[in-house]
Image: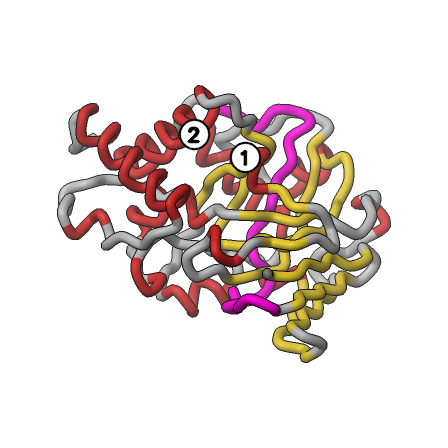
């Protein structure tokens, strides 16, 4: 690590305040050019700790920048990992207050819940399949705290991979009944089809993102516990939403997820 503990604490407070106050900030690596990957995840860990101290529960893990479309869109080549808290959840078909966010975007997510722990190193797709309890669809609302959605990989890791809101819908399905690589997704905004994709857009197979997450955590002496809700990353590119927009995402064999921005 390159940063001292006081700097990590200050940057975590800075980024979380930007989230909670819905105000954008400049990319933190501009002022901290020596910041390394361990520093970035240490800042994210401190943001998680701050939330948990205030009574919020960490309810899931997430992979970010895992689809080839998102990597191209953001100009990066490496996935990142973060978490979601209880207050970020919104009900299927419900409202999301646009004014609580900075510049929200929506993306379709294929999610799983584990029935057994996953540990790295050496975790692979087969191990994730064996540990998967069920599959469920969701839509993530990402909202980078960085001005104009411009960031580098270390900055977005520190910012908890732009986590903001998420909506779970559809119906749980057994993994054995699905082919996640060919599972089709259609994202509509105000009745207009804006994006179509298949699960293979996420690293060739959505569960590859979970294996990478387990291996990443293994390097840090952590693991994915049984019963963990995991968002495998956006199948589609992230699409900007505005007040009044209605979002509907249809997932083949999994049902649909919808929300309205007010």
Instruction: Identify the image quadrant of residue 2.
Output: top left
Other residues around mark 2 within 10 Å, as few (<14) / some (14–19) / many (≥20): many
Q: Are marks 2 and 1 in contact (CB under 8 Å)?
A: yes
Q: Main secondary structure of the magenta part?
A: loop
Query: Please, is residue 70 above or below residue 38 in the view?
Result: below
The residue located at (16%, 52%) in the rendering is: 30
Q: How is the image coloured?
A: secondary structure
The residue that label 2 is drawn on is 48
From the viewer's perspective, tell me whether residue 17 is left or right of residue 190.
left
The residue that label 1 is drawn on is 85
Other residues around mark 1 within 10 Å, as few (<14) / some (14–19) / many (≥20): some
| Residue 59 position in % (x across, y down) | 60, 32
| Residue 187 position in % (x across, y down) | 67, 69
Span colored in magenta:
222-244
Instruction: Identify the image quadrant of residue 8.
Output: top left
The quarter of the picture where the C terminus appears is bottom right
From the viewer's perspective, tell me whether residue 87 is left or right of residue 137.
left
The quarter of the picture where the N terminus appears is top left
The residue located at (73%, 51%) in the rendering is: 92
From mark 2 to mark 1, how far is it between C-alphas? 8 Å
| Residue 116 position in % (x across, y down) | 69, 25
| Residue 249 position in % (x across, y down) | 71, 64
């Amino acid at each position: 690590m390159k940063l001292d503990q006081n700097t990590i604490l200050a940057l975590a407070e800075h980024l979380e305040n930007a989230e909670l106050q819905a105000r954008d900030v400049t990319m933190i690596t501009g002022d901290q050019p020596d910041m390394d990957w361990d520093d970035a995840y240490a800042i994210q860990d401190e943001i998680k700790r701050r939330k948990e101290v205030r009574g919020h529960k960490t309810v899931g893990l997430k992979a970010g920048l895992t689809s080839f479309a998102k990597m191209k869109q953001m100009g990066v080549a490496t996935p990142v990992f973060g978490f979601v808290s209880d207050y970020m959840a919104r009900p299927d078909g419900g409202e999301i207050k646009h004014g609580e966010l900075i510049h929200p975007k929506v993306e379709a997510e294929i999610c799983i819940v584990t029935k057994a722990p996953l540990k790295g190193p050496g975790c692979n797709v087969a191990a994730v399949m064996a540990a998967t309890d069920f599959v469920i669809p969701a839509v993530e609302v990402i909202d980078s705290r960085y001005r104009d959605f411009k960031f580098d990989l270390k900055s977005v890791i520190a910012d908890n991979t732009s986590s903001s809101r998420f909506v779970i819908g559809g119906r749980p399905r057994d993994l054995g009944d699905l082919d996640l690589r060919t599972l089709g997704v259609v994202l509509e905004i105000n009745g207009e089809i804006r994006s179509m994709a298949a699960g293979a857009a996420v690293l060739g197979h959505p569960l590859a993102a979970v294996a990478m997450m387990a291996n990443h955590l293994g390097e840090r002496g952590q693991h994915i516990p049984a019963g963990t809700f995991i968002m495998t990353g956006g199948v589609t590119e992230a699409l900007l939403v505005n007040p009044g927009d209605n979002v509907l995402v249809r997932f083949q064999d999994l049902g649909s997820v919808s929300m309205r921005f007010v």
